Image (spheres, rainbow, N blue to C red):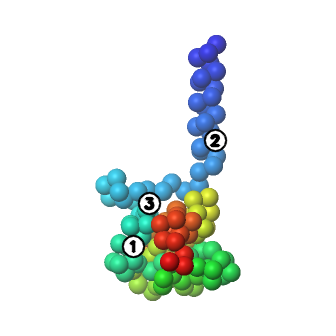
Amino acid sequence: MAVAIRFIACLLVVISFAACSGKVRHDFGGGGSDADVQILRDCPAVELSIWDGAVVFDLRDYDQWTQGHISGARQITLQDLERGRGLPDDKDAPVLFMADGPMDTRAEQAADIALKRGHNDVQLFPGGWRMWIGAHPVGE
Protein backbone atom coordinates (compact mmCIF):
# COMPACT_ATOMS: atom_id res chain seq x y z
CA MET A 1 0.00 0.00 0.00
CA ALA A 2 2.78 2.45 0.96
CA VAL A 3 4.63 1.67 -2.29
CA ALA A 4 1.51 2.43 -4.31
CA ILE A 5 1.03 5.75 -2.52
CA ARG A 6 4.67 6.72 -3.16
CA PHE A 7 4.32 5.75 -6.81
CA ILE A 8 1.17 7.85 -7.22
CA ALA A 9 2.78 10.80 -5.42
CA CYS A 10 5.83 10.63 -7.70
CA LEU A 11 3.62 10.34 -10.75
CA LEU A 12 1.64 13.43 -9.68
CA VAL A 13 4.86 15.40 -9.22
CA VAL A 14 6.08 14.43 -12.70
CA ILE A 15 2.73 15.32 -14.26
CA SER A 16 2.62 18.68 -12.47
CA PHE A 17 6.13 19.54 -13.69
CA ALA A 18 5.17 18.59 -17.22
CA ALA A 19 1.97 20.62 -17.06
CA CYS A 20 3.71 23.72 -15.66
CA SER A 21 6.68 23.72 -17.95
CA GLY A 22 6.70 25.72 -21.12
CA LYS A 23 9.72 25.56 -23.31
CA VAL A 24 12.68 23.55 -22.20
CA ARG A 25 15.55 25.82 -21.32
CA HIS A 26 19.07 24.68 -21.95
CA ASP A 27 22.01 25.77 -19.84
CA PHE A 28 25.33 26.47 -21.52
CA GLY A 29 26.98 26.13 -18.12
CA GLY A 30 26.66 22.35 -18.38
CA GLY A 31 28.92 22.24 -21.41
CA GLY A 32 26.21 21.21 -23.85
CA SER A 33 26.67 22.56 -27.36
CA ASP A 34 23.08 21.94 -28.49
CA ALA A 35 21.58 24.69 -26.34
CA ASP A 36 19.34 27.31 -27.94
CA VAL A 37 19.24 29.80 -25.10
CA GLN A 38 22.07 30.60 -22.74
CA ILE A 39 20.76 30.78 -19.18
CA LEU A 40 22.52 33.36 -17.01
CA ARG A 41 22.07 32.20 -13.44
CA ASP A 42 23.54 35.12 -11.50
CA CYS A 43 24.38 38.82 -11.69
CA PRO A 44 28.11 38.37 -12.44
CA ALA A 45 27.14 36.33 -15.53
CA VAL A 46 24.86 39.19 -16.63
CA GLU A 47 27.64 41.72 -16.04
CA LEU A 48 30.05 39.64 -18.12
CA SER A 49 27.49 39.33 -20.90
CA ILE A 50 26.96 43.10 -20.93
CA TRP A 51 30.73 43.61 -20.93
CA ASP A 52 30.87 41.31 -23.97
CA GLY A 53 28.34 43.51 -25.79
CA ALA A 54 24.94 41.93 -25.09
CA VAL A 55 21.93 44.15 -25.67
CA VAL A 56 19.71 43.88 -22.58
CA PHE A 57 15.95 43.86 -23.15
CA ASP A 58 13.78 44.47 -20.09
CA LEU A 59 10.24 43.10 -20.52
CA ARG A 60 8.76 44.87 -17.49
CA ASP A 61 6.21 47.58 -18.20
CA TYR A 62 7.35 51.16 -18.72
CA ASP A 63 6.36 52.33 -15.23
CA GLN A 64 8.42 49.57 -13.61
CA TRP A 65 11.33 50.25 -15.97
CA THR A 66 11.39 53.96 -15.08
CA GLN A 67 11.63 53.04 -11.38
CA GLY A 68 14.97 51.37 -12.10
CA HIS A 69 16.69 49.21 -14.69
CA ILE A 70 20.07 47.86 -15.70
CA SER A 71 22.12 50.66 -17.21
CA GLY A 72 21.66 50.60 -20.98
CA ALA A 73 18.72 48.18 -20.87
CA ARG A 74 15.98 48.74 -23.42
CA GLN A 75 12.37 48.52 -22.32
CA ILE A 76 10.38 46.46 -24.80
CA THR A 77 7.12 44.51 -24.92
CA LEU A 78 6.39 41.07 -26.27
CA GLN A 79 4.08 42.72 -28.80
CA ASP A 80 6.98 44.83 -30.10
CA LEU A 81 9.11 41.72 -30.55
CA GLU A 82 6.29 39.78 -32.22
CA ARG A 83 5.92 42.65 -34.71
CA GLY A 84 9.64 42.54 -35.45
CA ARG A 85 10.50 45.74 -33.61
CA GLY A 86 13.49 46.31 -31.38
CA LEU A 87 15.78 43.38 -32.11
CA PRO A 88 19.14 44.12 -33.75
CA ASP A 89 19.40 43.52 -37.48
CA ASP A 90 22.60 41.55 -36.84
CA LYS A 91 21.34 38.02 -36.06
CA ASP A 92 24.69 37.18 -34.40
CA ALA A 93 24.53 40.09 -31.92
CA PRO A 94 24.06 38.85 -28.35
CA VAL A 95 20.60 39.64 -26.96
CA LEU A 96 19.73 39.19 -23.29
CA PHE A 97 16.15 39.09 -22.01
CA MET A 98 14.98 39.70 -18.46
CA ALA A 99 11.70 40.51 -16.75
CA ASP A 100 10.59 41.00 -13.14
CA GLY A 101 11.76 37.71 -11.64
CA PRO A 102 11.70 33.93 -11.85
CA MET A 103 7.89 33.68 -11.93
CA ASP A 104 7.61 36.15 -14.84
CA THR A 105 7.74 34.18 -18.10
CA ARG A 106 7.91 37.15 -20.46
CA ALA A 107 11.70 36.84 -20.77
CA GLU A 108 11.38 33.21 -21.85
CA GLN A 109 8.70 34.14 -24.37
CA ALA A 110 10.90 36.94 -25.73
CA ALA A 111 13.86 34.55 -26.06
CA ASP A 112 11.63 32.17 -27.99
CA ILE A 113 10.57 34.98 -30.34
CA ALA A 114 14.20 35.97 -30.92
CA LEU A 115 15.09 32.37 -31.77
CA LYS A 116 12.19 32.12 -34.20
CA ARG A 117 13.39 35.35 -35.83
CA GLY A 118 16.78 33.75 -36.44
CA HIS A 119 18.92 35.20 -33.67
CA ASN A 120 21.86 32.98 -32.77
CA ASP A 121 23.13 34.39 -29.46
CA VAL A 122 20.03 34.49 -27.23
CA GLN A 123 20.47 34.79 -23.48
CA LEU A 124 18.00 34.68 -20.62
CA PHE A 125 18.30 35.99 -17.07
CA PRO A 126 15.44 34.26 -15.21
CA GLY A 127 16.28 35.99 -11.92
CA GLY A 128 15.29 39.25 -13.56
CA TRP A 129 15.06 42.62 -11.89
CA ARG A 130 14.38 41.13 -8.46
CA MET A 131 17.66 39.22 -8.45
CA TRP A 132 19.52 42.17 -9.98
CA ILE A 133 18.47 44.63 -7.25
CA GLY A 134 19.30 42.04 -4.60
CA ALA A 135 22.91 42.16 -5.78
CA HIS A 136 22.90 45.84 -6.82
CA PRO A 137 20.93 47.95 -4.33
CA VAL A 138 19.18 50.86 -5.99
CA GLY A 139 20.26 54.27 -4.77
CA GLU A 140 23.75 53.32 -3.63
- Residue 84, given in percent of the width and then of the height, sits at 57, 82
Q: CA distance from mark 1 to mark 2?
A: 34 Å
- Local packing at callout 2 (Cα closer than 10 Å; few below 14, some 14-19, many 20+) is few
Earlier-in-chain disc, 1 versus 2 = 2
| Depth check, front residue: 60 or 7 | 60
User: Which residue matches tag 2?
Assistant: 16
Q: Identify which amino acid the numbered label 3 is placed on.
A: Arg
Q: Identify which amino acid the numbered label 1 is placed on.
A: Glu
**For the point 48% across and 71% down, which residue is it?**
136
**For the point 32% across and 58% down, which residue is it?**
33
Q: State the mark number for residue 41.
A: 3
Vertical relation: 21 (above or below) 45: above
| Figure quadrant of residue 92 | bottom left
User: Which residue matches tag 1?
Assistant: 47
**For the point 45% across and 76% down, which residue is it?**
95
Q: CA distance from mark 2 to mark 3?
A: 24 Å
| Figure quadrant of residue 55 | bottom left
